Image: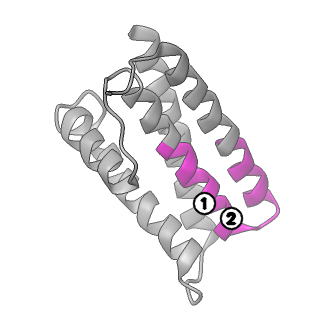
Amino acid sequence: MSPKISKELANHRLVQAKDELQDAKFLFNIKSYKSANNRAYYAIFHAIKAVLALEPIDFKKHKDVQAYFNKNYINTEIFPKNMGRKIVNASKTREDSDYDDEFIVKAEETQAQIDTAEELIKLVENYLIEK
């Protein structure tokens, strides 16, 4: 059975992304940068999943979600090309923050992560309005 196309699911995922972005900003403000990186990445991830909810497709692995989004939305310039690089960087930063005990996170990197999440959420919100 293939996943159902759902505008409601897309909107739910976008709300989830916005909530995670707010969490990231809060964590940034209290200087919990590793946790902020995690929340900002998940804001990005759920924003992407909001777009994919409009298609009869779903993935279990993050890398598959990103690969499909890059192929069908970044490479076709539905979303700006530079967003593809930002998403890859966000994913790597999140993995380093979550799994590398020796990873030293800088406020500037975390702010960039949050900025990417904010930018993508705005783009996705406009995309969903147009659909």
Q: Are marks 1 and 2 in contact (CB under 8 Å)?
A: yes
121 or 109: which is nearer to us? 121
Question: Which region shows up in magenta?
Answer: 21-45
- Please report the residue visible at 56 percent of the width from the left and 29 percent of the height from the top: 14
Would you say residue 36 sits in the magenta stretch?
yes
Residue 50's label in the rendered image is: none
Left or right of 71? Residue 16 is right
Based on the displayed image, in which of its 4 quarters is residue 118 positioned?
Answer: top right
Label 2: how many Cα within 10 Å (few below 14, some 14–19, many 20+): some
* Residue under numbered circle 2: 35
Left or right of 101? Residue 86 is left
Left or right of 110? Residue 122 is left
Does residue 127 lie above or below 84 as drawn?
above
Would you say residue 35 sits in the magenta stretch?
yes
Q: Position of residue 129 (x, y in %)?
A: 47, 11
Magenta portion: prevailing SS class = helix
The C terminus is located in which quarter? top left
82 or 74: which is nearer to us? 74
Q: Residue furthest top?
A: 130
Does residue 82 lie above or below 12 as drawn?
below
Q: Position of residue 51 (x, y in %)?
A: 40, 28
Amino acid beneath label 1:
Asn
Label 1: how many Cα within 10 Å (few below 14, some 14–19, many 20+): many
Based on the displayed image, in which of its 4 quarters is residue 57 positioned?
Answer: top left
- Please report the residue visible at 19 percent of the width from the left and 41 percent of the height from the top: 71
Left or right of 9? Residue 65 is left
* Residue under numbered circle 1: 38
- Please report the residue visible at 45 percent of the width from the left and 58 percent of the height from the top: 90
SS under mark 1: helix
Q: Position of residue 119 (x, y in %)?
A: 49, 37
- Please report the residue visible at 43 percent of the width from the left and 60 percent of the height from the top: 91
